[in-house]
Image (cartoon, grey):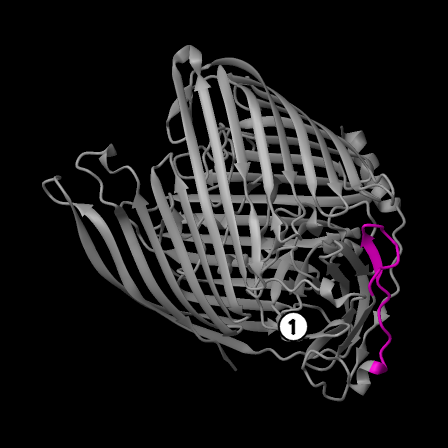
Amino acid sequence: MLRILLSILALVFTAEFFAQSPLTVTKITVPITFDGVPDEEVWNLILPFPMLMYVPVAGGTPTEESIVKLAYDDNYLYLSAYLNHIDPANIRAVGKKRDYSMPATDWFGLIIDSFNDRQNAFAFWTNPNGLRTDGTVKNDCNDSETDINFSWNTFWDVKTVINPKGWSVEERIPFSSLRFQVKGGQTAMGIIITRFDAAKYETSTFPPVPAGFSNAFWKPSLSSLVEFNGLKPRKPVYITPYITAGIGQVNVLNEEGTIYKMSITPKYDAGLDAKYSITNNLTVDLTLNTDFAQVEADDEKINLTRYSLYFPEKRMFFQEKSDVFDFSFLEGNNLFYSRRIGLLEGSPVRIFGGMRMTGRAGKWDIGILDMQTAPLDSNAGENFGILRTKRNIINQNSYAGGIFTSRLGMDGKYNVAYGADAQLRITGDEYMTIKWAQTFENDSANRVMDMSPTRLMLNCERRTIKGFGYNLLYSWSGEGFNPGLGFETIDSYQGFKCTLQYGWYPGEKRKIYYHKLSLIENLIWNSTTGFHETTANTLKWYFESKTGAYGIINAIWSLENLVDSIPLGNNQAYVPPGKYSFINLGATYSTASSHTLSSVFTGEAGTFFDGRKLSLSASPTMIVSSGISLGLTYYLDYVSFESRDARFTNHIAGLKALFTFTTKTSLSAFIQYNTAVEKVSANVRFRYNPREGNDFYLVYDEGLNTKLDRETPSLPISSGRTILLKYSYTFRF
């Protein structure tokens, strides 16, 4: 094993990596009329970027003309474009809500790798309606499901105009909203500019990106190097106070336990957030009495596995620069899981306040976070801390780093963790990732030279979707490993996962754009006893059409050895200890999401432990108009254990409605019904956002019981409701 590692490192050090020749961005000294039409004389003096097709024919000539230019002055980066259409009737102007991100509309924008680290980037997108969609990219967008974050917001502006030939756009991004380094008066950044034509499902980019990667126009490693001279951004201070007011109503059982009575509580609060750039590339955020009243509700889920369910972070404070704190062991496992802060078994916990500092010091990316929460019931108040550092080594796609986390209870309890990791780009698309961590807590042995509190991951992969690819993963999680500030889908295990795949593009004349065949094997043993727990073998075929539709067909053979029984659903049934072998067939089909009516359908059926299972789902979405969209979700799970005369059926139905009257005003509703808990939950939010940092929210939440006689005394119709007003205003100094 040591010889293999030394050989790999030798390849890294001897491989040739050629530096890009940077493009110098034009600095302008005359003012631009920021109106969405780049018709000033200064724009005529700047050469446009040559755009090339990415989809459906990589490297082909776009069917529509794009005149794209970039410029800057002392304060702003400007991106302008004329996005012409042969037939202007093909312009798709759908969506006005802040951070809307569906492919039902035309898109134009860019990602900016402001540190030129080839791993992380900021994204700024707009559509013909002039909406603002911004976000962050991490891990070189290795997994588009988890590495793109649209919840991050910053200060920037955009204007668009629809004209007889198409539409035009001007984006204005303050340099104070970016993080970067100045060396010798020069600043290097990476950019990828992208245009998406929804009617033709056509994507064009600058620079041209290869077809061998999924969502290649999101990958900072494929960006073009651009250079700025003499950047001296201001370092403004942002202070954002907020106030909330409202009412909470909850039905509680009387002292005799005979009837529920409504308890009404007024709700009012205040707090503030502050942001200051200590240097060009180091920013500190302070928060006092942190509030998340406006956050969208989680999706309802039913657990039919032996693994813990993962829910993504939706609170904006924890979204900004979340890539800096990431220490992922893949598949949801992470040494830092921000939902541990301010949430306890699904209930919100007051956050007194805290501090976050992110950015770069020299060659090191740095993230520091410290938060203090209040006591809740029998749980004492806690302090949460994290320090994360990493830096590029060897080449721009390799890094090494470390992490330290702490969870300190005011009652003396503690849980701390530390770890080290490295990612090495061996050559071409070949990568190797190593992660190692240990945890220590009160009432444990806390021995450093012990595998019990240790987490280890080794991952070798070829990051390509064209031709032969692979992903080899080994994981170890010891019996004593307990990340108090992290997330683990399963405890005390070691496992090996092997993915072999082959992808190909049939050719320009075929309706199918891309095929991929995959063979996946997953083996899991208990790390303490060595007992074999799980084997799962999957054969999968994925295809994607040139219109954006896609499908998946798979067959899964599973072997499960259970030492203990596992509960299913909402404790509706259980599986007793034993050895089980079962087979499932599954399929997924998604219509083109750029169409007015689109949907994703899934189905899975087969044996399930000592019984059978049928799962179906559908999620249609309808674009009613440019400002109105409706979405439905439906999940069905039927599980039957005939030999034990046990069975249950779960239904989850949801409705999402979005009304965007202007790019500044929106109304959204999310209503869900879950038969497992026999409850309807409703979350309705009205938002008025006249400018970045200035928000007014009206939020309504309620839970409704659907089977009142399931308990004695009978349950009330409403389990509780909350109506809140929240207003925040940002002062800039």
SS at circle 1: loop
Q: Position of residue 610 (x, y in %)?
A: 49, 14
Q: Is residue 486 visible?
A: no
Q: Quadrant of residue 505?
A: top right
Q: Quadrant of residue 30?
A: bottom right
Q: Quadrant of the N terminus?
A: top right
Q: Quadrant of residue 279?
A: bottom right
The residue identified by callout 1 is 280
Magenta residues (range): 44-64
Q: Residue furthest top?
A: 643
Q: Is residue 573 left or right of residue 326?
A: left
Vertical comparison of 601 with 361: above or below: above
Q: At x 42% / y 16%, what residue is drawn?
A: 576
Q: Is residue 137 left or right of residue 730?
A: right
Vertical comparison of 65 with 57: above or below: below
Q: Position of residue 435 (x, y in %)?
A: 64, 40
Q: Nearer the viewer, residue 470 or 612?
A: 612
Q: Residue furthest bottom?
A: 30
Amino acid at dot 1: Asn
Q: Residue furthest left?
A: 256
Q: Position of residue 448 (x, y in %)?
A: 54, 36
Q: At x 62% / y 63%, what residue is drawn?
A: 134
Give neighbour class at mark 1: few <14, some 14-19, many 20+ (Cα, 10 Å). Answer: many
Q: Is residue 539 left or right of residue 288?
A: right
Task: Give the prevailing secondary structure in the magenta stretch.
Answer: loop
Q: Position of residue 361 (x, y in %)?
A: 65, 64
Q: Nearer the viewer, residue 670 or 210?
A: 670
Q: Is residue 513 left or right of residue 534?
A: right
Q: Does the segment drawn in magenta span residue 202? A: no
Vertical comparison of 86 with 202: above or below: below
Q: Does the segment drawn in magenta span residue 48? A: yes
